[in-house]
Image (tube, grey):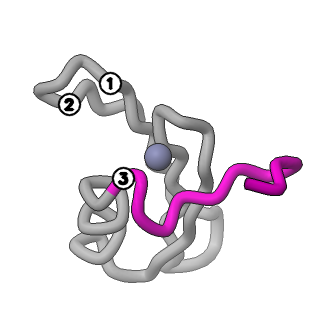
Amino acid sequence: MTVPASTGEIYRVDWLPGTDVLHGTCHCGAEHTAEDPVAMWEWMLAHPEGHHLRGTSS
Ligand SMILES: [Zn+2]
């Protein structure tokens, strides 16, 4: 599913098939997995803290 945040940014969260693991993609392109939906939201809302894009060295 995609979730439009109040800021107008789009977050995407999917369940990984056959697991209890959530896979989330931030509007900035960073990805994160968590078993706890609350932890997933906390990660998303903490943007840009803990958000590291693949392929970037910064
Ligand atoms: Zn982000």
From which residue to which does the magenta span run? 47-58
Q: Quadrant of residue 7?
A: top left
Of marks 2 and 3, the one in the foreground? 3
Helix, strand or loop status at disc 3: loop
What residue is rendered at 47% in x and 77% in y?
Answer: 34
Residues packed near mark 3 inside 10 Å, few (<14), some (14 to 19) or many (20 plus): some
Q: Nearer the viewer, residue 47 or 14?
A: 47
Residue wearing tag 1: 9
- Please report whichever mark, 1 or 3, sits nearer to the chain's N-terminal start: 1
What residue is rendered at 33% in x and 80% in y?
Answer: 36
Residue wearing tag 3: 47
Left or right placement of residue 25 versus residue 57 in this view: left
Left or right placement of residue 50 versus residue 39 in this view: right
Furthest toward the left, the residue is 6
Q: CA distance from mark 1 to mark 3?
A: 11 Å
Q: Say if 50 sits above or below 11 in the image.
A: below
Residue 22, image x and y in percent?
49, 66
Q: Say if 21 sits above or below 7 in the image.
A: below
What residue is rendered at 26% in x and 25% in y?
Answer: 4
What residue is rendered at 64% in x and 58% in y?
Answer: 52
Kind of residue at badge 3: His
Residue wearing tag 2: 5
| Pointer 3 residue Cβ closer than 8 Å to ligand 1 | yes
Whether pointer 1 and pointer 2 mark residues with C-beta atoms closer than 8 Å, the reply is: yes
